[in-house]
């Protein structure tokens, strides 16, 4: 039972990180129907930013966390303005190719600036193990799970209860009508990218705490797994992204627990294939009917 609970917590920890990244995927896709494959590499930038602030500038871990999240937020908005806005009226394939190009650009820039080897990230968050019901749990794991749940709750409140959230929902439903109603579409889209990138920044901090190293390609596989989580939960759905992240994390934990850890990546993508065949809209996604 102790092993089962331990694996469950490990699955929820990694699933929480996938969920935070998947939230960014879902938000951007819900607004402009774009699969932003550069989103995973924003996490890589956040990890390097935290490493640079702590190792090269010798600043406090709290400042490293704040500046890393800020760097991810600014980068997300810059990418949207420079790469995606000029192509907004282009076919979706053009945007998709651009997103993949931005991903490779960020990876190669990181390799050029920081080198191909991994950089060790100092401890950003630390604390004693937490004991619950006789079971000891990692402090980092519990913080990761709590932060992800709180982030989803705050994001849900933002989308459902605030003026900007209503603007985001209006733009996602019909961009042209929203613009006619006086909504600043450009500002709304930029805000969406900023929030999604900030969540990626939080994810980068939590990921760096669990796996304390930064490398140019660290965001590639993480981003793909988060994309699978978004599709599994229902891309465009905030609760779906969180549910999908937890499911993927638990699936990896179960596969590792039975001694098949080398197959855990394959299981994730097998889940993607099954979902696309059986229920393409995902667990909490809704089918969209288009009039001809």
Image: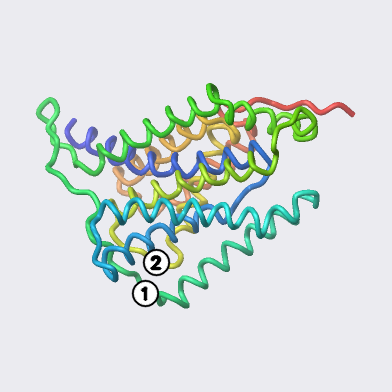
- Find residue 247 and report its image quarter: top left
Residue lying at the far right of the rendered structure: 292
User: Could you say where residue 283 lies in the image, as x and y percent from the top left?
Assistant: 55, 27
Please state, as top left, top right, bottom left or bottom right, where the C terminus lies in the image.
top right
Q: Secondary structure at mark 2?
A: loop
Residue lying at the far left of the rendered structure: 134
Name the N-terminal-most of marks 2 and 1: 1
Residue at (13% x, 40% y) in the render = 129
Q: Are marks 2 and 1 in contact (CB under 8 Å)?
A: yes
What residue is shown with label 1?
117
Give the CA separation, mark 2 to mark 1.
6 Å
Please state, as top left, top right, bottom left or bottom right, where the N terminus lies in the image.
top left
Badge 1: residue crowd in 10 Å (few <14, some 14–19, many ≥20)? few
What residue is shown with label 2?
215
In the rendered image of this protein, does residue 210 appear above or below residue 278? below
Residue toward you, 238 or 174: 174
Q: Secondary structure at mark 1?
A: loop
Residue toward you, 134 or 73: 73
């Amino acid at each position: 039972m102790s092993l089962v609970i331990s694996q469950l917590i490990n699955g929820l920890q990694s699933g929480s990180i996938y969920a935070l990244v998947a939230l960014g995927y879902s938000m951007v896709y819900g607004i402009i129907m774009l699969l932003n494959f550069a989103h995973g590499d924003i996490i890589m930038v956040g990890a390097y930013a935290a490493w640079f602030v702590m190792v090269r500038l010798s600043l406090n871990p709290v400042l490293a966390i704040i500046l890393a999240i800020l760097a991810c937020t600014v980068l997300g908005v810059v990418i949207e303005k420079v790469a995606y806005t000029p192509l907004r009226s282009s076919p979706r394939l053009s945007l998709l190719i651009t997103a993949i190009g931005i991903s490779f650009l960020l990876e190669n820039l990181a390799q050029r600036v920081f080198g191909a080897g991994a950089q060790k990230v100092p401890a950003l968050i630390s604390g004693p193990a937490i004991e619950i019901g006789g079971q000891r749990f990692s402090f980092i794991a519990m913080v990761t799970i709590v932060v992800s749940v709180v982030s989803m709750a705050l994001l849900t409140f933002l989308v459902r209860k605030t003026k900007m959230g209503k603007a985001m929902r209006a733009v996602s439903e019909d961009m042209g009508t929203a613009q006619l109603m006086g909504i600043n579409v450009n500002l709304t889209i930029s805000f969406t990218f900023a929030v999604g990138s900030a969540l990626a920044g939080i994810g980068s901090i939590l990921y760096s705490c669990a796996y304390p190293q930064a490398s140019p390609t660290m965001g590639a596989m993480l981003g793909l797994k988060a994309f699978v989580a978004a599709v599994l939960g229902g891309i465009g759905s905030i609760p779906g992204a969180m549910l999908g992240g937890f499911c993927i994390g638990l699936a990896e934990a179960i596969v590792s627990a039975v001694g098949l850890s080398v197959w855990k990546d394959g299981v994730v993508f097998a889940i993607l294939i099954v979902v696309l065949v059986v229920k393409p809209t995902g667990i909490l996604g809704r089918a969209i009917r288009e009039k001809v």
